[in-house]
Amino acid sequence: MTTTAVTNAAPGTTKPRRDRSAAVKDAIRASARKLFTAQGYDATGIRDIAADAEVNPAIVIRHFGSKERLFIETIDAVNSWHRLFDGPIDDIGRVVVRKIVGGRRKGLAVFGTIMRASGRADVRAQLQESTITLLAEPLVGRIDAPDARLRAHLFAAQLTGLMTALAVYDDDFLLDAPIDDIVERYGASLQNMLTGP
Amino acid sequence: MTTTAVTNAAPGTTKPRRDRSAAVKDAIRASARKLFTAQGYDATGIRDIAADAEVNPAIVIRHFGSKERLFIETIDAVNSWHRLFDGPIDDIGRVVVRKIVGGRRKGLAVFGTIMRASGRADVRAQLQESTITLLAEPLVGRIDAPDARLRAHLFAAQLTGLMTALAVYDDDFLLDAPIDDIVERYGASLQNMLTGP
DNA sequence: GTCTATAACGTGATAGAC
DNA sequence: GTCTATCACGTTATAGAC
């Protein structure tokens, strides 16, 4: 078994020396990420993850506390939405829509996985936090308007709407529509929400 | 069908003489609706519903097949979104947002409940069907544009985005924002998606 | 012959004993 | 760390009540 060294982005945590359990935890994380994204939260059991990681089911709980905490720690939206808002603010609407709809980005699938698990309170809290701090607040300081924060939060809401249509309830018409058409219409609308009159 | 005229054995309550099971099913539906909307799908157990309806847990399954089918039959989006698109098409964006944000309707809470349970495949299918047939398709024939269907589906996506922000991940800033501000910004954007240039 | 109640089954997450 | 116990859950088998 190969151990993939995934750097943890959590600040203030010190990695222990060479802990054998670290490799086990990484293996569990990798299996959990694979199965959660492929099958969703409910359909993925602790036993499935443990079997895939070739460890005992009990140590999964022992290391991560609960299935829900493992899910939250594993399916983190931070990396998948990284640099989503790069580029000039004047054309960010279309750029973001293209990244989401057409790109090879995993952000859309991750969003769908999290939204579909939003029945759990802790998952919902993570969804709230990541949406606001990653999709709404970063834009507040970049736009010049008296209602900048309102615009940014409504922008984030609108953005989640498109992602929900594509990755949660699977609107077949939109999934089959030409990417450029969606980019043009929805991107322009998003842009107008942010910097329009 | 059966015509057995016998009072129910429930203590202290007088039930209708005919169609015993119909009254039982109604009681189960009422309890299920109450608990599902108050606590969500996961936190509500068959035993909770049965206790609230003062029936045996087994007959809940016997009458409705499964917890998921009971949920779908109970939390139906049709009624809560009834006549949502009444009124002239030229101002439907603002009107719809006001209906949703204003809080008078139960549609928002119902949407949140369904979305939070979207991890279940059958619930997700119901969400897809109700969103497309109730929020997108009714608008297609009412707008005069070559890309009418695209506009309508993106309109529905945008609308679900606002509802998701308010009833799923609970954007506190939007929940505290003045209703008129949201109506003006988001309603105008929705309107533009539908009938704008 | 339906409708209901009791009990039990299988599976899930999780906690405690070796 | 591993094994086993426990508890809650949805669901089913079975037998009783009308």
Image (cartoon, coloured by chain):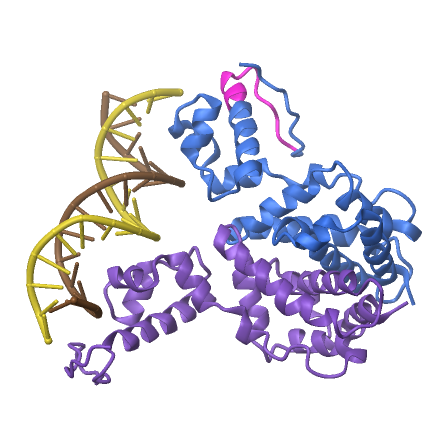
Chain colours: A blue, B purple, C brown, D yellow
Give the number of callouts. 0
Q: Is residue A14 magenta?
A: yes
Q: Nearer the viewer, residue B126 or A92?
A: B126
Image quarter (top left, top right, bottom left or bottom right) of the C terminus of chain A: bottom right
Residue B164 horizontal side relative to residue A137, left or right:
left
Main SS category, magenta section:
loop
Q: Which residues are magenta?
A: A12-24
Q: Position of residue A68 (x, y in %)?
A: 49, 42
Residue B167 horizontal side relative to residue B3, left or right:
right
| Quarter-of-image position of residue C2 | bottom left
| Quarter-of-image position of residue A76 | top right
Residue B117 visible, this orientation: no
At 44% from the left and 66% from the top, the residue drawn is B73
Residue D5 horizontal side relative to residue B85, left or right:
left
Q: Position of residue A26 (x, y in %)?
A: 55, 24
Q: Is residue B79 magenta?
A: no
At 53% from the left and 23% from the top, the residue drawn is A27
Image position of B178 with respect to A84: above or below: below
Image position of C5 with respect to A86: above or below: below
Image position of A41 with respect to A62: above or below: below
Q: Nearer the viewer, residue B146 or B196?
A: B146
Q: Position of residue A81 (x, y in %)?
A: 73, 41
Residue A83 visible, this orientation: yes
Q: Position of residue B89 (x, y in %)?
A: 77, 78
